[in-house]
Amino acid sequence: MAGPAKNPFAAGNFSIFKFCPCGCHLGMARQIWLLLAGCLLVHGAAFVVPTSQVQVHGQNAPAMAQVQQTRYESNPYAAFSLAAMSCSVGMLLGWMRARRQHAARSVIYAAMRLSPLAASAAEQSVAMPYPIGTPGQPWGDAEKAEWLATREIERSYDKEVLSKLQGMKERFDVLQYGALSHDSSRYPLFAVKSRDWVKDKPCVLVTGGVHGYETSGVQGAIRFLETEAEKFAESFNILVAPCVSPWGYETIQRWNAQAVDPNRSFNPNGEIVPGRSFNPEAATEESEALIKFIQSCNIDSWLCHFDLHETTDSDESEFRPAKAARDGVEYQPDEVPDGFYLVSDSTNPQEEWHKKLIEEVAHVTHIALPDKDGLIIGEPVSQHGVIQIPSPRSLGLCAGVTNAKYATTTEVYPDSPSASDEQCIMAQVKSIVAGLNYFLSAEDCKA
């Protein structure tokens, strides 16, 4: 398929200035980044917010906004830098639209969080029409092909996932259960199984990377295998599928190569409710392969299932706008929660178990608070850090792929200034460990 038509604002076709002050040639993107960086430096130097006004996790945001409002009105340098930032953000977003790269949107969305006054302007910029397709019209094959053609390899599934799994063969059974037809040699599907399975031991499933771009889900599953799984294998049969969507992992995408959300594809015949944020989608190779593999294990009853995920700024800056464009509906912005939370089944809430997970994860990273409407990602909060949704099985979610008595979807927030990559990985590990220790301490292993 031919590539998209050249755009005058694409990198290399337009320049605000061809050379920087030292004389070196700069591409369009780097020119705008330098302009934005300069504006941020001026903006930051224009005034310093007293530490007494800063409170962790944004809980003092109204006071901060008032302080900044006063300082903008009284400081011409701050006002000038904000105006210049708006211009550079606009140019960068224009470049991003021409290049079809979601990374620019994500960075801008996150960067503008630095200024409460600029946040609304950033949200309006990010909410611009998605660059693929026609607003109000669902995508056809041509739009999906265009979307696929503009995805790029960002990291290595082989180096970051497969090599780690191969190193586990002395301690676990490392099993290939399929491969993606997009490139079967590049994207084999693997699961790791504890040895000495005993029929009387309860069975535990851990899945990561159903959304391939959610890094800590993949690396958290691997870290659990590396550091904790052998200990718990004395009491449980453990099965881990650490990277269900390897193409999404390499390209840092939520969807698979066919522009379908794997975490809505585990029940393609499920009921679709117009306007609901969770709705089943078409079957995918990723979900079908995992379902077939789990069925081949011949497990009559699963004790628990941990499905490891993240909620990121790119959900709002790229993936939800892309979904709205794909489906031909209007994009409705939502708030990205700052912190860890769990997604439970309203038909099987297991509240004490979820409470224990939240208590333990709180030792590693902060827990998300509800928004002004008392919701997290638009869903009701059942207890601190836990939301409830309809049955995951009915929605086509991976968390409903088994008949587990206890099942949850973890949601780590990796874009928080208060959480490092390591904390995000450890939050995933801690949630699994806490959930399994709950059964051991309650002597409920054979529940």
Image (cartoon, helix red, strand yellow):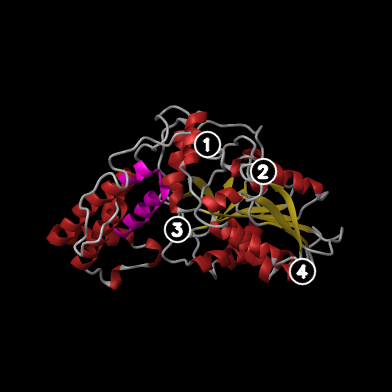
Distance Cα–Cα, label 4 vs label 2? 28 Å
Q: Secondary structure at mark 3?
A: loop
Distance Cα–Cα, label 2 vs label 1? 21 Å
Q: Amino acid at mark 2?
A: Ser
Q: Amino acid at mark 3?
A: Asp
Quarter occupied by the C terminus: bottom right
Q: Is residue 393 magenta?
A: no
Look at the image and tell me whether residue 343 can be seen.
Answer: yes
Q: Is residue 118 left or right of residue 208?
A: left
Please report the bounds of the magenta region as a residue range. 95-115
Query: Which residue carries the number 4 mark?
Result: 170
Q: Residue at x 63, y 44 (%)?
A: 397
Query: Which residue carries the number 2 mark?
Result: 287
382 over 140 or under it: above or below = below
Q: Of the residues tagged 3 and 4, which is closer to the observer?
A: 4
Query: Residue 387 in the image: x percent, y percent?
Result: 55, 51
Q: Amino acid at mark 4?
A: Glu
Query: Which residue carries the number 1 mark?
Result: 276
Q: Are marks 3 and 4 in contact (CB under 8 Å)?
A: no
Q: Secondary structure at mark 2?
A: helix
Q: Is residue 343 left or right of residue 95?
A: right
Between discs 2 and 1, the one toward the N terminus: 1
